[in-house]
Image (cartoon, rainbow, N blue to C red):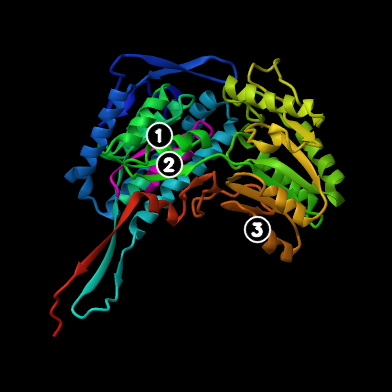
Amino acid sequence: MRSFSALVQTKALVNGAWIDASNKETFAVSNPANGQVIGHVPNMTVDDAQDAIKAAKQAYESKEWRSLTAKDRSNLLKKWHKLIEANTQEIAEIMTAESGKPINEAKGEVVYGNAFIEWFAEEARRIYGEIVPSSTPNREIIVMKQPIGVAALITPWNFPLAMITRKAGAALAAGCTVIVKPSEDTPLTALAVAKLAEEAGIPKGVINVITTNKAAPIGQLFCKSPDVRGISFTGSTQVGKLLFRDSADGIKRVCLELGGNAPFIVFDSANVAKAVDGAMASKFRNCGQTCVSANRFFVQEGVYDKFVSQLKQRVEALKIGDGNSCDVQIGPLINKMQFDKVSGFVEDARSKDANIIVGGKALKELGPLFYAPTIVTDVPPTSQLYTEEVFGPVVSIIKFKDEEEAVQKANDTQRGLAGYFYSENLQQVFRVAKRMEVGMVGVNEGIISAPEAPFGGVKESGVGREGSHHGIDDYVDIKYICMGNLKYD
C-alpha cells in the first residue's frame, strides 16, 4: 500500500512520458470542502493536445499494440483492474480531496468504476464477427469488427474515475488508443488511474492524459483533427451539442452522455418505505450531482402526505460536512458556479410561491460551497427546478391525480436519460416502463447503473451507450469482406 502523496501526479501523461505543459503553466486543484489547494497540474495547450493525438496515433499503428490479440488486451486490462483494486483507499482519498465526495462514496466509486475495467477485460474476447450465408455460389460473406483508431475521451468531475474507466475500458478492449481530457476540477484522480495503467504494462501512447483549464480549444481540436476517429463525452447537453456540431465535418463516431431531468414517480400502489429509500439513494448520492439523479418527484395524492413526511425525516437526519469523516453523507458542491446554480434555482422557486419545507439555504458555517439538503413542494411548472436539471441536493415534489397525468408530466421535457417509478401493480409496471421516454428506467429501484447494463439516454440526453456489450460499439467499425470465385467443386 502506498501513501496518498505517492499516487498523486503533478504532470500530464503523453507518449509514456510524464511532462509539463509546453508553456510551463500550471493550475491549482482545490478541495471544495475547505478551499485548500491540494496540488498543481500542467495547463496543457492545443499544441500539447496535438502531441497527445500524434502519440495515440503512433501507438495505434505500432506493432507493439496492433499485434496484441484480444486475449493480450484482456490480460492488460485485468492487470490494470488488479492495481486499481489494490489502491482503492489511496484513489478514494484523492477523489474526496478534489471533489468533496464523502470517503465512503469515493470508495464505492472506485469499486463501481473498476468493475467496468473488469467487464471490458472480459468483453475484449467477445467482439465477434459473422459468416453470412451468400446467395451466390462460390462466394463467402465475412463480417468483422475492427477498432476505429484514436478516441478522445472527455470526462466530468462528478465521477472522476468511473467515467474514465467506462470509456477507456471499452476503447482499449476494442483495440483503440485514447486521449483522456479530465475535468479541471478533478484531474488528480485521472492521473492516478493513468499511473496505474502504466504500471500494468499498457504500452506508451495507448493512454494519454491532457490536463487543462482551457477545455474549449482542445475539445475543438479533438473534433476537427482527422487523426481522432471517435469522441466520447459525458457532461452538459449544451457542450455536447457543440461537440456534435464540430465533429460533423469529419463524420466522427460520437458518443454523448448528456444531462437529464429524471422523473421519480410514486404511485398509490407503491411501497412508500421503499420509495423513500430509493429517493434518498437516487437524489442525495454525490450531493445530488449525478446525471441520473431524480430531479422531479411526482407523488400520487393517496400517498403524498405519507411520502413527504417520511422523506422529510430522512433528509433532516443527513450528516453534512467534510468528506474525510466516515460518518458524513453529504459533502460540498463542486464549485461556486454549481453552488450559485443550485441556490438560484431554489430562490426562483421561492419567488414563485413554492413551499420550502426543509433546507433552502447555504451552510456557510461549514464552508462556502455547502448547501443544505432541501425539499420543495408545490413546485410550479414554470420554475427552473421543474424545467431544468438542478444537479444538487434539492428534491422538487409535485402532486398528481392519475397515471395518465404522471406519465404526461414525466415526459414533458426534452431530456430523457433516466426515470424512476414505484408501484406494486404489475400491469402498471409494464405500462409505465414502456411509456416513459428515457433510456433507462428504475422500477422500484433508485440505483440502476451497472457494468452489465447499457447506460445512455434518448432525446437531448445523448447518443450511444456505455457499459454492457453495447459499450464496445462506438469503438469498432464493421467491415464486410466478400470472398469470391471460391472453388468448392
102 or 63: which is nearer to us? 63
Would you say residue 420 sits in the magenta stretch? Answer: no
Q: Secondary structure at mark 1?
A: helix
Residue 193 is tagged as 1
Callout in the foreground (3, 2): 3
Query: Label 3 is placed on what type of residue?
Result: Arg
160 up-or-down from 279: above or below: above
Q: CA distance from mark 1 to mark 3?
A: 40 Å
Left or right of 433, for residue 451? left
Query: Label 2 is placed on what type of residue?
Result: Thr
Left or right of 58, for residue 33? right
Residue 435 is tagged as 3
Q: Which residues are magenta?
A: 148-170
First-in-chain label (1 vs 3): 1
- Name the residue that disc number 2 marks: 165
Q: CA distance from mark 2 to mark 1?
A: 9 Å
At horizontal 35% and vertical 14% (from top left) the residue drawn is 25
Callout in the foreground (2, 1): 2
Q: Position of residue 238 (x, y in %)?
A: 51, 34
Badges 2 and 1: C-beta atoms under 8 Å apart? yes
